[in-house]
Image (tube, rainbow, N blue to C red):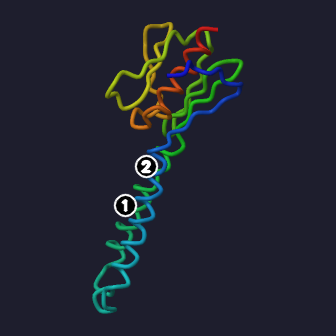
Amino acid sequence: MAGPEAVSLPHTWRPFGARIAVIVLGVMLVLLCTFAWFGFDPEVRAKFTLFQRSTLVFLGLLAGSVGYALTRSRVVATEQGLLVVNGYRRHHYEWAEVVSVHLPPGAPWATVDLADGTTASLLAIQGSDGERARDAVRALRLLIDR
């Protein structure tokens, strides 16, 4: 195994597998629903009330917003500190606040230990991304230790 490589700042990490899954499954779901809707006879489509149609659109938008939240997750390392975007929440930590970062085997995502004794999840570094995630954790450790 090669040693960890230093990254130039600013540097952004984003989830890979989760983004691919959201895009592929989202497209498949839209295609499935479209073909199913137009596969119905006109009289069957006419039986759907406005409320039922609105509910289906709302559920589709809700699923889309969850998928978007997953794909927009990121960790940005700058000279000032670490910007963590998890879903629709943003947190900025100065480098002095960040004590360590770890990704235990089988963990869904990396976490950072903070100086106040709390931890923060890094949804952008997904355990399912394998070596890519481990490389990101190694790079973050180098930045924390500098």
Spot the residue most to the front: 1
* Gap between marks 2 and 1 measured at Cα: 11 Å
x and y percent of residue 65 in the render? 46, 52
* Residue that label 1 marks: 59
* Residue that label 2 marks: 66
Q: Residues within 10 Å of mark 2 (few under 14, many from 20)?
A: few
Instruction: Reply above or below: 132 against 35.
Output: above
Labels in figure, total = 2
**Mark positioned earlier in the residue sequence (2 or 1):** 1
Identify residue type, mark 2.
Val
96 horizontally vs 106: left or right? right
x and y percent of residue 44 in the render? 28, 87
x and y percent of residue 82 in the render? 61, 22
Residue nearest the viewer, comparing 17 with 59: 17
Depth check, mark 2 against mark 1: the one in front is 2
Residue nearest the viewer, comparing 70 with 44: 70
x and y percent of residue 13 in the render? 58, 33
Query: Going 59% across and 14% down the picture, which residue do you hit?
Result: 142
Identify residue type, mark 1.
Leu
Instruction: Reply above or below: 96 against 68.
Output: above
Query: Going 32% across and 87% down the picture, which residue do you hit?
Result: 46
